[in-house]
Image (spheres, coloured by chain):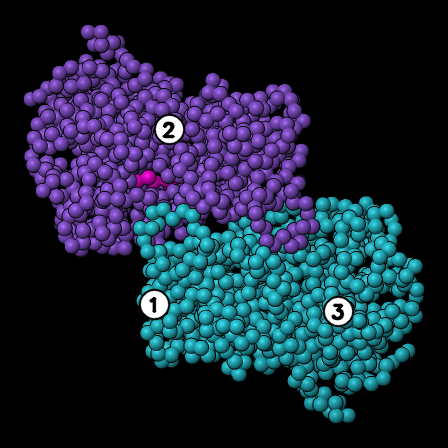
Chain colours: A purple, B cyan
Amino acid sequence: MRNLLLCSLLSIPAWGVAQTSSENLVPYVKPIIGTQRMGHTYPGATVPFGMVQLSPDTDTIPYEMNGKYNGDVYKYCAGYQYEDKTIVGFSHTHFSGTGHSDLGDFLIMPTVGELKLNPGTANEPRSGFRSAYSHNNEVAEAGYYKVKLDDYNILAELTATNRVGFHQYTFPQSDQSHIVLDLMSGIYNYEDKNVWTFLRVENDTLVTGYRQTNGWGRTRTVYFAMTFSKPFYQYGNKNFSKRQVYQGFWRKFDQTKNFPEMAGKQLRAYFDFKTTAGEKIKIKFALSSVSTEGALLNLRTEAPGWDFDQVKQQAQQAWNKELSKITIQSKNKDDKENFYTSMYHAFLTPITYMDVDGSYRGLDQNIHKTKDFTNYTIFSLWDTYRALHPFFNLVQPSRNADMIKSMLAHYDQSAQHMLPVWSHYANENWCMIGYHSVSLIADAVIKGNAPFDANKALDACVTTARHGTYDGLSYYMNMGYVPEDKNGSSVSKTLEYAYDDWSIAQMAKKLGRMDIYDEFSKRAQNFKNVYDASIGYMRPRLSDGSFRAAFDVLSTHNQGFIEGNAWNYSLYVPHEPEQLIGMMGGKKRFVAHLDSLFTMHLPDKYFAETEDITRDGIIGNYVHGNEPSHHVPYLYNWTDQPWKTQERVRMILKKQFKPTPDGLGGNDDCGQMSAWYIFTALGFYPVAPGSDQYAIGSPAVDGATLQLENGKTFVIEAQNQSEKNVYVQKMVLNGQPLNRLYLTHGDITSGGKLVFVMGEKPKKK
Amino acid sequence: MRNLLLCSLLSIPAWGVAQTSSENLVPYVKPIIGTQRMGHTYPGATVPFGMVQLSPDTDTIPYEMNGKYNGDVYKYCAGYQYEDKTIVGFSHTHFSGTGHSDLGDFLIMPTVGELKLNPGTANEPRSGFRSAYSHNNEVAEAGYYKVKLDDYNILAELTATNRVGFHQYTFPQSDQSHIVLDLMSGIYNYEDKNVWTFLRVENDTLVTGYRQTNGWGRTRTVYFAMTFSKPFYQYGNKNFSKRQVYQGFWRKFDQTKNFPEMAGKQLRAYFDFKTTAGEKIKIKFALSSVSTEGALLNLRTEAPGWDFDQVKQQAQQAWNKELSKITIQSKNKDDKENFYTSMYHAFLTPITYMDVDGSYRGLDQNIHKTKDFTNYTIFSLWDTYRALHPFFNLVQPSRNADMIKSMLAHYDQSAQHMLPVWSHYANENWCMIGYHSVSLIADAVIKGNAPFDANKALDACVTTARHGTYDGLSYYMNMGYVPEDKNGSSVSKTLEYAYDDWSIAQMAKKLGRMDIYDEFSKRAQNFKNVYDASIGYMRPRLSDGSFRAAFDVLSTHNQGFIEGNAWNYSLYVPHEPEQLIGMMGGKKRFVAHLDSLFTMHLPDKYFAETEDITRDGIIGNYVHGNEPSHHVPYLYNWTDQPWKTQERVRMILKKQFKPTPDGLGGNDDCGQMSAWYIFTALGFYPVAPGSDQYAIGSPAVDGATLQLENGKTFVIEAQNQSEKNVYVQKMVLNGQPLNRLYLTHGDITSGGKLVFVMGEKPKKK
C-alpha cells in the first residue's frame, strides 16, 4: 500500500506526450562509482561523449619494469584508484572502464615551493611533485571535479567543454608557484612509449605541442594548445632521455630555461608564477588529433572566456540534457544514483574525435574532414555491441548513426579493409575477438536507424567477415569452426562469429540481398560445430575434427575460451536460443544448467584465472563482471520459467551495482556494464542485437520516461515494484494486455506506455 | 692571334637582345664531380631545385658506433663516395656538398635470388643486399643516373620530376626478383634516429608511408607514395627493433608477410616479383612534407604515366633551360664542364618544399599553404649568403625572392622569433654562426629584387639581430664584441655579426629607416673591437677587455675562430675593406699580408685541424675549401695591386676545380663553392652582399651571355683570354671604357656588353 501510495504521488507524465524534465539529475551522478578496484572508471571532469576527460591520476606506474610486465599497472587503466593517498596530477585523456589501457596525456600539476620535476613514488610522496589528498576534500560531479592538494594547500578544480579541459587552481601566497606540464606521464606507460613529444612556448600565456606514442594505439598523436589566465614570468624544462645523440648547434642555447622550443622523448616542462593568497590561476587545455593549429581553433571556439563557473555550468547543463533522456521514479536514492551514474558512464564513450571544423586524423594518418556527421573514436566493440549500442539506438539514435558512420570511415581508411574491432585515436588495436562492428550496423539497420548507405555498409560487413587472414576466419569459413590447434580461444571465436554472421544475414534480408542472407544464415549455424553433445557443452575442437581431450568446463584459460569458461560460453548463442535449448537437451535440462550456473560453488582456483573482475563479480559460476554472459539471465524467457529471469536480473542488479567507489564488480567496459544496468532496471534487454526484440525482465524502477529523439515518449510504470516484488504479474501496453515476453523496438519508438504490475510471487503460468 | 681568331669564330650574339641558346648544355654537366673525398656531392638524378634527389648510396655507416662518434660517417654526407665498390641502394633525399648531414630517406634496392633484408658491409658485401658495381657501367647526367648492379645483373636507371623519383630496373629472368624498401637506412644515421616509420600497402601496386627522424633536423617527417609498374605477387617486412613492448592483439596476424600495415622504428619491407629476362620494373616514388595524401597528389600530378624516357627527357630539358641562363664560350672542354657543373650544383639547393597544391609543413609542424610563392628549404646560409644567393639575385631573381619569402615564413613560424640560421625540412638546426638571413634580404632589397614587404622583412632582420639569448649576441650588443671566455668562436662571431649589421644598415637606409640605419651602422664597426693592433691580427678578447694571451695566428681550433684561422679571418671585413686596410697598417702592409697568405708554407699540424677540405683545398695558408676567405683574393682591388686579384683568382680556379670525381678541394656547401666558381670565371665577384657592387677579377671564359629574367641580356667578351693571359688590360662597357674595379648590379641588369681585353702581363697602373 505504501508503495502504491508513493507511486501515485509521483507525477508520471501522460504517455505519448513529449515533455522535458526540469529536475536536476546531475546530483544523482556519482563519478566516484567504480573508481575502486575493478570498475576502472575515472572521477574527473568531462562532458557527454567529450574528447577531453580531465581527471586526477593517482599513480603513473609503468607497464613494464626491468623488461617485465608489471601487473600492478592494470589497476591504473583509468589513472585513478580510490585507495591511493596521493595525486600525481591531472591528465586530459582517460578510458572509462577498460581492461587494458593507454592515454593519460598531458599531466598537469600545480605546486608551490621548491620545484620538483619528478612525480615521486606512492611510498615516498615527498620525493616528487605528487601531493597527498583526502576524499573528504574531494568532490566528483558530472562535469566537475574538485580536490584539495594537501602538500601545497592548493585547491584544484576541473571542468571541461567537449575539446577543452579547464583547470582552476587556487594558490596560497608564494613566490614559487609552479605549473608542471609532464609530457612523459601516461597510462600504461613504458620507457619507449613516448615516440616523440614537442612543445612550443608561443608567448607568455600560450603553449602548444603534441605527444606521439606507441602503445595500445600503435601510431598515436595528440596535439594540444594550452593557455594560462596569467602570464608566467619564467619557464623551463628538463629532458629525462637517457640518450640524446645529436645536439649540435642547439648547444648555442641554454635549452632548459626560457627556451621556447622543446622536443624529445622524455620531457617535463614547468611554468613559474608568483601568487597572492587565494589567487586563482586558470588553464584552458585544448586537444586535437589534427595539429596544434586545430587545438587552438578548438580552444578559441569552445572556450573563449575565463569564467570557470560558467563553463562548469554549461558542462552540467549538457549532462542534464543527456541524463534527462530517461527520467526514473524510484523510492531508493541508491537506485537513482546507480541509474543516473550508469547513464553518465554510458554517455562517456565513444568520444568525439574531430576538431570543431570537422577535421580529424584517420586510420591512414591522413587528415580527413567530415561535414555531415560527428566522428567518434574509442570503440570497445567486443563489449559494447551487446547493450551499449542497442541502448544508443534507443535514446541516442543520431549519435549511434554517427558512430557507425565513423566506423565506416575507419573501414574506408583501413589498409586491412576491415571494420573496427577495437579502435581508438586513429588506431586499430585488434583487442579481443569477433567482428562485432557488423552487429552494430545490423542492429541499426534492423531498427530503422540507418541514415547511411546501408548497402555499402553491408558490403563492408561482408568484406570484414570474409577476411581470411583474420584470427582463424579462413578455418572458420572452410571448416565451420575455428580449430583450437590452429587458433586459440577457438570456441569463443566460433560462437561469436556465428552470432555476427546471423546479424549480417538479418541485415541482408532486410536489404533484399538474399545471396548474402543465405551465405551468412548458413554460417550463423556454425555454433553447432563446437557443441559436444556427449558432455553437453561447447568444447574446443581440433583441425582433425575431434574434440580436444583435455578439458575442464570450469576453466577459462587456454582451452578455447576467453573471459568466460565453457559453462558460461556454452550459452552464447544469443541469436538462436531455441536451437541452443534443443541442442542442450530441451528446456528442462537447460533450466537446470542455468540454475546451476547461478547457484553452484566455483572453487577459488577458477576465480584466480577469471580476468578483470572482483570476487563479487561472480555469482555462483555466473560471471557478470565480464561480458559473455550478459544475455544469459534473460535466457529463462525461452524456457517455461521466465520468472527466473526476473528473479536473477534483480539479484544481479542488487549484487553487482552499488553507489560506492567499489560499486562495480568488474570493468565498466566503456559503458557496456552500465547499459546492462539501465536496460535491466527498465525491465527489458536486447538479447540479440540485430533483432528488433527486447526480452522482458523485471523493472527495478517504479517508473521511467524515455524521451525519444523522434519527439515521442515511452513511459514505463512498474506498479507495486519493490525489492521483494520482482515478479511480473501482468503487462499492459498502451492499455492492451501484453501477452508476450518481449517488446519490439517499434513498441518503444512509437511512443506509449507500458505498465508492469509486479508481485512478490512468480507468475508461473 | 689564334685565340682572337677562335673568338671571332664564336657567334657571340649582339648584346642587349634576348636570345635562347639552342645548344644542349646537359652533356657538360658531370654530376660525378665532387663525389670523391671532400666535395660531398651526389651523382644521382634530380631536377633544378627539386624536392627529390634520387641517388645511389655507397654506404650507410652509422653516425655513432658503441656510443661514440664514428668519424668515417663524414665521408657519407651525400651518401656516395667514388672509391666505394658497392652500392647499398638508391635513396630519395640528399644534401649537396654539406659538411654535416641528414636525409637519405627511403632506400630502394632491387635484387634477385635469395631475399636479403640487411645491407651487408663493404668488407663482406655478399653478406647483404648491397651490390658491386663498376664506374665503367655507370652514367651520371643532369637528371639521369644509370648503373649496372653486378651482383644481380640488374640495370638500374633513375630520373626524377620535382617531387617524384622515377626508378627503372631491368631484371634478368628470375622467380625471385625483389624490391627492398629500407625504412631504416639513412644518412648520418644512428640507432635511435628513426623516431617512427609507417607503411601501408594500399593495393598490389601502391604503398604509402612516412619516416620520422630525430637528427640534424630534430623533428622531421617525410611522407611518401610509391607505385609499381607491375603488381607484386607477395610482400612482407622485418622489424629489426630490439624492443617492441606492446604487441597485444596484433599477434592475431602474421605481420611479417602480406600484412598491409607496418609501423615501428626499424623496418625493412620487400616486394616480390617473377621477372622475364630484360623485364623492366618501374617505380615512381613521390615525397611530401605534408601527408601520404599529399605525396599521392604529387605523384599523380607530376608523373601520371610510365614513360621513363619521357620523364628523363623532361628532366634534362628542365636542366637545359636553367643552364642556358648563362652560356659561355671557352676553348677548353674542362672549363665548360667545370662551369656547367658549377651551374648544375648551384641550382640544386635550396630545394622545393611544398606539395603541388602549395601545402607544406612549417617550422611549427603545422601545415601551411602558400599561394603566391614556391616554398623552399635547405638554407645553408653561413655558406650561401656569400655568393650563391647574390648569384641567384642575378640569374634566378624570382626564385631568390621566393627563397626569402620562405625564410620570412620561417620567421613567422619560429618559436624563437628568428630568421633561419641553417634550416632544412621544417627544422632549424642552428648550424654555424651569424644571422646571415639578413644578408640575403639586404642584398635582394639593395638590388631591387624585393617583391615582398621589405619593411616587414627589415623588422624580422632587426628582431633576429637583437635576439639576446642567441650565441653571444647579448655580449656583442652590450660590449661591442663576443668575449671568448663567455662564448666560443668569438672573433668569427663578432666579425660576421658586424658584417650582417652593416647589411641591415644598408637595407634600412634604402627604406628610409634611419634610426635602424644608425644603430646597425654603429654595430657594423664592431669588427674593430677584436683587432689587436699590437700583433696586426684579429684576436679573441675576454670579458675583462683584454686579448686572450694564448694565441696562435695559424691555429683554427678553440681560440676564437671557426673554419678559418686568424690569418684568414682577420680579413673578414667585407663591408669595410678600406677601413680594414687602414687598420692593418695601410695598403703596402696589407698586400704583404695577402701575399704571404697565398705563398707561405702551412705546417702540416695546422692542416690536420682544418675542417671539411682536402690538402689541396689550401693554397699556402689560404683556405679555399672553407668559406670565410672566399672574398679574400678580391681584396687586392682595394690596394694598389688589383692585378694580384686577377692572378690569384685564376690560380684558384685552376687549382681548386677539376672536372673529375675528386675535382673539388672542399665541400661544395649547397652551391656556394660553385657560385664562387661561376662569378670568378665570369670575371667579377660580390665581395659584400648588400652592396650593389661586384669586384672585378679575371674572366676565365672567352665569352659569356647572361639571359636575365627581365628579358635583357648581358654579354661578356674576354678578348685574348688564355691560361697565361690572366691580366685585364682594358675594359669596355657598352662601348665606353670602364675605368673602375667594379661592376654594379644595374650595369648587368640593364643589359649590355662588357669587353675585357686580356694580356699576359699585369697592368700595374
Q: Mark 2 highlights which residue?
A: A37
Q: Kindly state the secondary structure of the residue where label 2 is placed.
A: loop
Locate residue B729 relative to residue B677 in the image: left or right. right
Q: Quadrant of residue A449?
A: top left
Q: Residue at x 28, y 13 (%)?
A: A331
Q: Nearer the viewer, mark 1 or mark 2?
A: 2
For the residues tagged 3 and 2, is the chain the same? no
Amino acid carrying mark 2 in the image: Arg
Q: CA distance from mark 3 to mark 1?
A: 55 Å
Q: Kindly state the secondary structure of the residue where label 1 is placed.
A: loop
Q: Provide residue B58's location: percent of width, then percent of height.
A: 54, 71
Q: Mark 1 highlights which residue?
A: B231
Which quarter of the image is occupied by the N terminus of chain B?
Answer: bottom right
Q: Residue at x 30, y 23 (%)?
A: A657
Which quarter of the image is occupied by the C terminus of chain B?
Answer: bottom right
Rendered position, A153 above or below A262 = above
Q: CA distance from mark 3 to mark 2?
A: 70 Å
> Does residue B246 appear in the picture of this structure?
yes
Badge 1: residue crowd in 10 Å (few <14, some 14–19, many ≥20): some
Read off the chain for label 1: B
Q: Which of B479 and A704 lies nearest the eye of the viewer?
A: B479
Amino acid carrying mark 1 in the image: Pro
Q: Residue at x 33, y 26 (%)?
A: A664
Locate residue A681 relative to residue B300 in the image: left or right. left
Q: Residue at x 8, y 32 (%)?
A: A589
Q: Mark 3 highlights which residue?
A: B607
Rendered position, A76 above or below B347 = above
The span picked out in magenta is: A376-381
For the residues tagged 1 and 2, is the chain the same? no
